[in-house]
Amino acid sequence: MGQDQTKQQIAKGLQLYQSNQTEKALQVWMKVLEKSSDLVGRFRVLGCLVTAHSEMGRYKEMLKFAVVQIDTARELEDADFLLESYLNLARSNEKLCEFHKTISYCKTCLGLPGTRAATQLGGQVSLSMGNAFLGLSLFQKALESFEKALRYAHNNDDTMLECRVCCSLGSFYAQVKESMKIALQHGDRPLQALCLLCFADIHRSRGDLETAFPRYDSAMSIMTEIGNRLGQVQVLLGVAKCWVARKALDKALEAIERAQDLAEEVGNKLSQLKLHCLSESIYRSRGLQRELRAHVVRFHECVEETELYCGLCGESIGEKNSRLQALPCSHIFHLRCLQNNGTRSCPNCHRSSMKPGFV
């Protein structure tokens, strides 16, 4: 079956599928898969089969076709096809509740460099990752992923994606509420504080600052009572973002200063990085160059202290969307740098790097 005939048969299958003749559509697509030698056509028909089986709830079959699609994408050696197929693999595992695998495949999608499809599919990747985090009850990470997916939806005017994200947020809200109920029944103060923080972040992300502030106050009260200083930092960071949204920058800086003191006390570099980033944006908007430079310097000092840089090129890890490689010795480099270096041992400690893992 040639390229033109393959396209015609795929279109025929789509017409049948859209007219609710699902089984006939599947038969047409399966014949294309069996007879076509056109790799691009096979990739497209596999995508149709993945979508159809997903909508029918046949998730094991969905996964089977997603795996075949990955193999086809590798034969095509095209980053866009790889992105689409890895996303289908992530979705398949999400449906089968293999959440750790879903997150791993989503991270692979995000690590693929320079794909044209990234702007269209990036939101779908973030949504799938958020659903996986929600499945693992990692509420904060789930919310962060859903917020990214919403930004993609708004930037690309994708109402369907926005609708799907809102559905996931509804499930998220229900699960957090249930967790809060259980925590109250069992007197679990740390869990109550975490749930209140999540509620506050949800309201802030929706622009409902009047509701967010009292939730942050309640979370802070419990975090202080139980002595959770890192939790207090997270609350203050959320409060500062609320004040920034209200353009009350002096109050935002007050909250940031309190959070920075606590973050330095506990030695949490990630929190310090977030706080310096927020401070940078505030001082940049005010045109205060001396204060801006101070936070830029401190930010890069934190990056060095956390060793968030490539040991070969010296660039900070995370400033660009680059694929990383972790060696068995735990040193991390840009994948491109290791490939260019051409060595089979770690450039830092010279241990063997026979079995690397991707980050």
Image (cartoon, grey):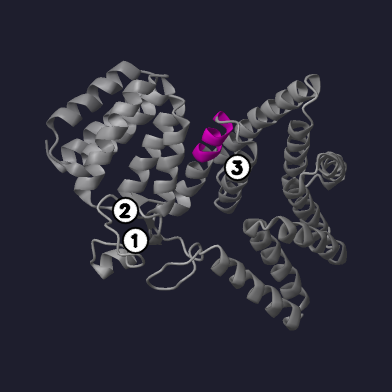
Q: Please state which of residues 316 and 71 is positioned toward the viewer in this rendering.
A: 316
Q: Position of residue 6 (x, y in %)?
A: 19, 36
Seen at 32% across and 22% down, the residue is: 61
Residue range in magenta is: 128-135
**Residue 51 picture location, percent across and down:** 38, 30
| SS for callout 2 | helix
In this view, the residue in front, 148 or 220, is 220
Residue at the spot of label 2? 79
Question: In this rendering, is residue 142 above or below 182?
Answer: below
Mark sitting on residue 239: none
Find out whether residue 255 is within the magenta segment. no
Q: Pick the quarter of the image with the N terminus.
A: top left
Which mark is first along the chain, 1 or 3?
3
Looking at the image, which is closer to me, 313 or 19? 313
The spot of residue 84 in percent (x, y) is 36, 44
Q: Amino acid at mark 2?
A: Ala
In the image, which is nearer the foreground, mark 2 or mark 1? 1
User: At label 3, which amino acid type do we have?
Assistant: Lys
Q: Is residue 263 left or right of residue 73?
A: right
View extreme (bottom): residue: 290
Q: Dot 1: within a 10 Å radius of its alpha carbon, few (fewer than 14), some, or many (20 or more) residues?
A: some
Nearer-N-terminus badge (2/3): 2
The residue that label 3 is drawn on is: 141
Q: Is residue 40 above or below residue 11?
A: below
Q: Which residue is mark 1?
A: 335
Q: CA distance from mark 2 to mark 1?
A: 16 Å
